[in-house]
Structure formats: structure tokens, C-alpha cells
Amino acid sequence: MNLPLGSGPLAGVRVVELGGIGPGPFCGMLLADLGADVIRLERPADVGRASEHPVVHRGRRSVALDLKSEDGIAAALRVVDTADALIEGFRPGVAERIGLGPDVCLARNPRLVYGRMTGWGQDGPLAQQPGHDINYIALAGLLGALGHPDREPLPPLNLVGDMGGGGLLLALGLVAGVLSARTTGVGQVVDAAMTDGTAIQLALVHGLLARGLWADQRGGNLFDGSAPFYRTYRCADGGFVAVGAIEAPFYAALLAGLGLQDDPLFATQFDTSAWPEMSARLADGFSTRARDDWAAHFGDLPACVTPVLSFAEAADHPHHLARGTFTEQHGYLEAAPAPRFSVTPAGPVAAPPAIGEHTVEVLREAGLDDDSIARATRAYPRR
């Protein structure tokens, strides 16, 4: 499969992605979506198999190499020599042990931006400990703020640590590093830790804490589902609506839409002592009609009331259809590339390649002859 390389604001940027899971591949997807030539190095034992992650592995070229062999490492280094950036998601020290650490790679390619994706970071007491998104956001202070105060903390899928605090943070770091390298000629190591990324996403909350406007606890705060005007409500059909009427005009529109504009209970919006009773009253109101009835009722009102949709429903919503937010061009639902660029728009999303599909093509581009390619690929399974 020949990918439509060169379309998007990152056209001309080459990234080597050492095969991994979670936030590293998500970072690679984001860069590939925006036009980077992302080359994913994968295990030879998997050659010919379809990707197990058809969305986050989209848009790559795939090279299968045995990174436990000298010939495989030598071939990988030749590919790294041609790259602007590298994504590595091993535990600290593993890349060094196999011969693909930053010292080796930067000595060969001084302009390389070497991106390291971990949960805890490259140093610190926990650097060598295993973990997952839930652990990183717990230690960063986020998880303890999520959920009902009388129940256990509720994880927000794996979005905040893995994707926002991991993949997105590393993508930003790599783009910034490549920009710097093209200006200075000097590459560097980017240490992207999911704990760091989670912590920095809490900037607004930390600011509210500093001003005494946030209680360091689960429940009772503006954005945690405690405020009656910033939470979800169950409707008559079992569906839900989301209410985000923080500002005064939106709050007024919410009350007007529910016929509560003259109710004295709602006269002081930020009286936290009244929040439980206000929430109960709003819950009673929303329970009288179906979700889509409320969505239609509030459709033209500036009340910040929207239906809570499933993944399938979201893809079919008129707003997303108008903007092309989702696509099903490969037989499954996926989001289109974002953000959007007026002069260098991203090209069509390419399906993920079969594992090892581009091995010979990429190794030839890196200058390897046929004998070297044969040695580098001799660990391939013989079918």
C-alpha cells in the first residue's frame, strides 16, 4: 500500500516510532494525521498480521525488525539516521540496553528529537515501577477529585493520563523540538511523563485552589458534578442531558427553559449551601421528559444544555456530520484528523498497514543494500 505522504502541516517530517502501546502510538497517530512520515518499527514475529489497533495505528509505514539482533539494531539505526524525531515508550534504560538509546542515536543524528514516553518519567523514585493511566492520574491528584463524594473515585476512561497527559504532550514536545532543531541544528531528548502531563492539565484547578475557590476534596466544586448548573440529569426515557450553564446569561436561559426563572431557590447561583436542593429540583424537572425532547426544547436556547450521546449517536449528530468530525471510510468509526488547517489541511486518513508491509521500501530509502536487508529480516517467520 502506498500511503499519501506529504499532505498536511508536518509534511517533510519523518518520525520513527518504536512499537509500543497506548500513548506512544497515539502520539504517532497525531503526527501522521498531520502529514508526518511515521515509520513504526515492529516485531518480526507479527509480520503480515493486520494491526490490532486499527485507529491509533493508521497512517504509518510499518517495518518489522528484530531489535534483539545486531543486524536488526543496525538496520533500525540506519532508519533513525534519516529521521527528524523518534518515539520510544520503554521503561527507563531499556532503549539503552538494546542499543537504541538517545546517546547512540544523537551521536549519529545530532538533529534528532528523541521523545521518551513513560508514566513516571525518566527519573524519580517510581521511574522503574509499572503503572497505568489510573495510577498516574491518582498520584497526580486528579483521580481523587472525580466522582460522587460518597462513592469511589471514577476513572475518566484512559483519556487524561494516556492520551492527554501522554500522547498529546509528547506530540507537542516533538513538534517543538523539531522546530528548535531546524533553527539551531541541535536535537535533544524530550522526557514526557504522564504524571507531569496530568499535573499540567490541572492548571486551572490549581489556580482556583490558590484563590480559595476550590476545595481539595471530591465533591462540592464547580466542575466536579456538584454544581446544579454543571452536571448531568436523567430524563424520563433513561437518557441524560448535560448542563453547563455557568455564566449568568446561560444560567438565566436554563431557568427560563425550565420555567424556574422566578423561583427564589435559584436566585443566588453560587450559594453552595443551596446546591443540593437546587440539583434535586432540576432533577425532578428533567425527569419529566425524554432526552431528545429536552434536546429539541433547548436547541435554540443559549442554556448550554446538550444530550449525552453514545459513540454511535455522536457520529450521526447533525453538527458532526456537517463538519465531518467522524469517518467510517475503512469500515469502522474513527475521528477525522484534528485540528484543522486552512492552508495545509491534513490529507485523507490512511488505513493501518499490515505489520512489516514497508520493511524493504523503508530500508532501501535508508541506504541498505539487498544483502543487509536480508540479514536484517532473517528473523521473519517462514510461512
Image: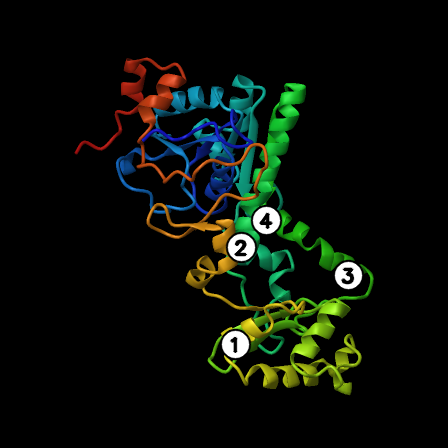
**Viewer-side residue, 379 vs 284:** 284
Q: Looking at numbered disc 4 in the image, what kind of residue is underneath it? A: Gly
Circle 4: element type: helix
Indicate the quadrant where residue 287 lies. bottom right
The crowd level at tag 4 (other Cα within 10 Å; few <14, some 14-19, many 20+) is many
| Residue closest to the far left | 383
Q: Looking at numbered disc 1 in the image, what kind of residue is underneath it? A: Asp
CA distance separating discs 4 and 2: 8 Å
Q: Looking at numbered disc 3 in the image, what kind of residue is underneath it? A: Leu
Q: Of the two numbered discs 1 and 2 on the same chain, state the one appearing first in sequence.
A: 2
Residue bearing the label numbered 4: 165
CA distance separating discs 3 and 4: 20 Å
Residue bearing the label numbered 3: 208
* Foreground label between 1 and 2: 1
| Residue closest to the far front | 300
Give the numbered dot on residue 293: 1
Indicate the quadrant where residue 56 lies. top left
Residue bearing the label numbered 2: 159
Q: Is residue 78 above or below residue 296?
A: above
Q: Of the two numbered discs 1 and 3 on the same chain, state the one appearing first in sequence.
A: 3
The crowd level at tag 3 (other Cα within 10 Å; few <14, some 14-19, many 20+) is some
Q: Of the two numbered discs 3 and 4 on the same chain, state the one appearing first in sequence.
A: 4
Indicate the quadrant where residue 191 lies. top right
Q: Is residue 297 above or below residue 76?
A: below
Circle 2: element type: helix
Q: Looking at numbered disc 2 in the image, what kind of residue is underneath it? A: Leu
